[in-house]
Image (cartoon, rainbow, N blue to C red):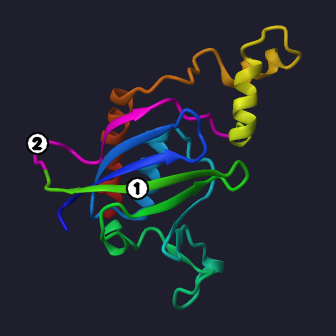
Amino acid sequence: MTDIIQLKVSLIDSEPLIWREIHVSKETTFFELHHIIQIIMGWKNYHMFEFNLEGYRVGEVFEDERTEGYGNDQIIESRTVAIKDLITQQKETFKYVYDYGDDWEHKIQVENFLEEDTTLKFPICIDGRMNCPPDDSGGLHNFYESMEILKDKKHPEYKEISKWFGKSYDMKKFDKEKINRQLKNLAKYIADWDS
């Protein structure tokens, strides 16, 4: 396996599809990948998360959940497992779930394995489309319902919904430069976590 992995992260059932393509190091832990996804998708890291791949559940393990071995119902600590430990082939897919209440499900596809480009800093977002729904917007169904309400200023819930989403929210906006600035800052924190 080469040093860099290209992943496509898509919000399942979004229409049009909300997605991002990123390059990450194969040494990236799933805990770090969680934080990368939070930035690229625009989430705020308010809620719990879990990755699901080939029968493995990877997430945050709290003291009262620690057990020996990795059974089907046990969660592997995301800080201790790197992408390279579980991802070995191109075209593999796995799931990332964020916020068990709103249930934001993401499909992650391994698109390519690449040689490291020493002129670039990783992680980096290389492409994407659409803006992610804001945290706590009630899942995809409620999010799209809110978008319809915002089209009708006479709707009885318009004032409340517009206040919740704010004037700056734009469903079609994808700001790669902003994302990459935030990823650059995250890379500094990741270096501190590892030391």
Where is residue 194 drawn, in percent x and y?
Answer: 31, 63
Q: Amino acid at mark 1?
A: Gln
Q: Main secondary structure of the magenta part?
A: loop
Q: Is residue 130 left or right of residue 115?
A: right
Span shown in magenta = 117-136
Residue 65 picture quarter? bottom right
Please name the residue shown 13% across and 56% down the image: 115
Where does label 2 land, which residue?
A: 119
Where does label 1 land, which residue?
A: 109
Where is residue 28 drawn, in percent x and y?
Answer: 32, 61
From this view, report whether residue 37 is shown above or below residue 170.
Answer: below
From this view, report whether residue 71 is shown above or below residue 139.
Answer: below
From this view, report whether residue 178 is shown above or below residue 139.
Answer: above
* Magenta stretch holds residue 184: no
- What is the crowding at mark 1: few (fewer than 14 residues within 10 Å), some, or many (at least 20)? some
Q: Is the C terminus in the top left, top right, bottom left or bottom right quadrant? A: bottom left
Q: Is residue 63 left or right of residue 84?
A: right
Label 2 residue SS = loop
Where is residue 27 drawn, in percent x and y?
Answer: 28, 65
Where is residue 186 drawn, in percent x and y?
Answer: 36, 45
Please name the residue shown 52% across and 23% down the image: 172
Q: Amino acid at mark 2?
A: Thr
Return the residue found at the far right: 156
Return the residue found at the far top: 154
Return the residue found at the far left: 118
Please name the residue shown 17% across and 63% down the image: 2
**Front in this rendered view, residue 110 or 117:** 110
How far apart are the alpha carbons under marks 2 and 1?
25 Å
Which comes sooner in the sequence, label 2 or label 1? 1
**Front in this rendered view, residue 136 or 7:** 7
**Front in this rendered view, residue 174 or 44:** 174
